[in-house]
Amino acid sequence: MPPNPSKGAEIIGAYEHPTRKCPEKTLAQIHLECALGALADAGLSLGDVDGYFSAGDAPGMGSLHIADYMGIAPRFIDNTELGGASYLAHVAHARMAIESGRCNVALITQGGRPRSDAALGLGPRALGPGVPEVPYEAPTGINTVASYALMAARHMHEFGTTSEQLAWIKVAASEHAQHNPHAMLRQKVTVEDVLASPLIADPLHRLDCCVVSDGGGALVMVRAELARELGRHGIRIKGAGEAVKGQGAGALDMTFTAAAWSGAQAFKEAGVRPEDIRYASIYDSFTITALMQLEDLGFCEKGKGGRFVADGQLISGVGRLAVNTDGGGLCNHHPSSRGGMVKLIEAVRQLRGQAHPAVQVPGCRLALVQGLGGRLAGRHASATLILEGA
């Protein structure tokens, strides 16, 4: 049964860290600064927080260490770790915690500094020997970009998708990013620019890949009654879904993502259809990532994603569906190699009418947010949210 809106939870605070490289800040500092920014936006303080949500980007034991660092003592904590999908799952979990009376003010934070760590010669965390697949996959040298290149190659083989069509996703991101003063890549690019960039893992070019950035973000969710007391008209969670997709004991179908499952859950709960959505934040670690999720979420038929994204159809004011109006992970921000939080924040801006005027969707009342975590050609998690503005 859908939650009762009068007793629901609402997002009333959001903050995106403005930095994209911060070697002078610790990871804990980034989490704290994001928390303070979101709480200020909500008209609250750290002392009001009684629920805290974090994921694998938080140092140490996540919520335990960061909560202590921030000086809060939450009565509800959640360390759900689903990679880039974590923060969407946190929103759904926070709603349940608030509606069940487990907490009143939920804080969700993300922070990372992979760009600074790379400059310092610190490599990313490797999967430990206890992870079941490591002895079998590590010797083959599989890595993230190769995994997504496999998905792109399969999609091209099955459906005739072209590199030119994938490039249009980057073009749309750059069209939006030029209006974002914090975006890492603000220069507009063309399809020809994308195709001329070096191949990283065939068929993916460098401009098919997301940026690597420091920074983070945070959200604050509260009881609906508290939002009214604070004079806030928050963002409601109209539908939510989560799913995981593994390798099926070797029978891996690389033509779809777990978004097909999590999206179906979210749309069913929300009681709306893809045609009702005019703005979507779609996880875009690579161009192929975004294309496949658009298909799996039902915005177009399976195999027709290439035609759906071509000719600028994802650009706000051009196509029917505006996607990633902040520039997305392809141009704006992909902190700690996890893009879910930033996707949520831009959806909040759209629903508040606070996106840049050049990309604001007129009368935006519904927004879809889609996140992934893991590797598409291995095992991954998906989380989908449908949000509704006041």
Image (cartoon, rainbow, N blue to C red):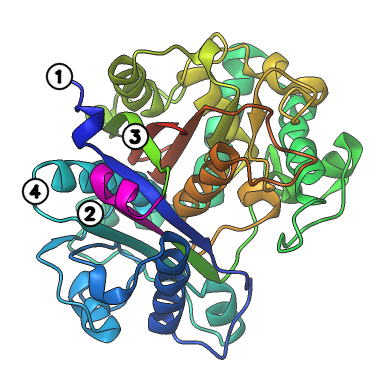
Q: Give x and y (percent) for residue 367.
A: 51, 30
Question: Mark 3 — residue?
Answer: 237
- Given residues 223 and 88, the one toward you in this image is 223
In contact (CB < 8 Å): disc 2 and disc 4: no
Mark 1 or 2, nearer chain start: 1
Q: Residue visible at 77% across and 58% down?
A: 185
Pointer 2 local density, CA inside 10 Å: few below 14, some 14–19, many at least 20: some
Mark 1: which amino acid? Met
- Given residues 96 and 206, the one toward you in this image is 96
In reply to whether residue 48 is colored magenta, the answer given is no
Mark 4 or 3, nearer chain start: 4
Question: Mark 4 — residue?
Answer: 101
| Whether residue 20 is situated above or below residue 97 in the rendered picture | below
310 horizontally vs 149: left or right? right
Question: Element at badge 3?
Answer: strand
Q: Report the disc number at residue 80.
A: 2
Mark 4: which amino acid? Gly
What separation in Å lies between label 2 and label 3 (alpha carbons)? 19 Å
Q: Report the disc number at residue 74.
A: none
Mark 2 or 3, nearer chain start: 2
What separation in Å lies between label 2 and label 4 (alpha carbons)? 19 Å
Question: Mark 1 — residue?
Answer: 1
Q: Is residue 61 visible?
A: yes
Q: Nearer the viewer, mark 2 or mark 4?
A: 4
25 horizontally vs 228: left or right? right
What separation in Å lies between label 4 and label 3 (alpha carbons)? 17 Å
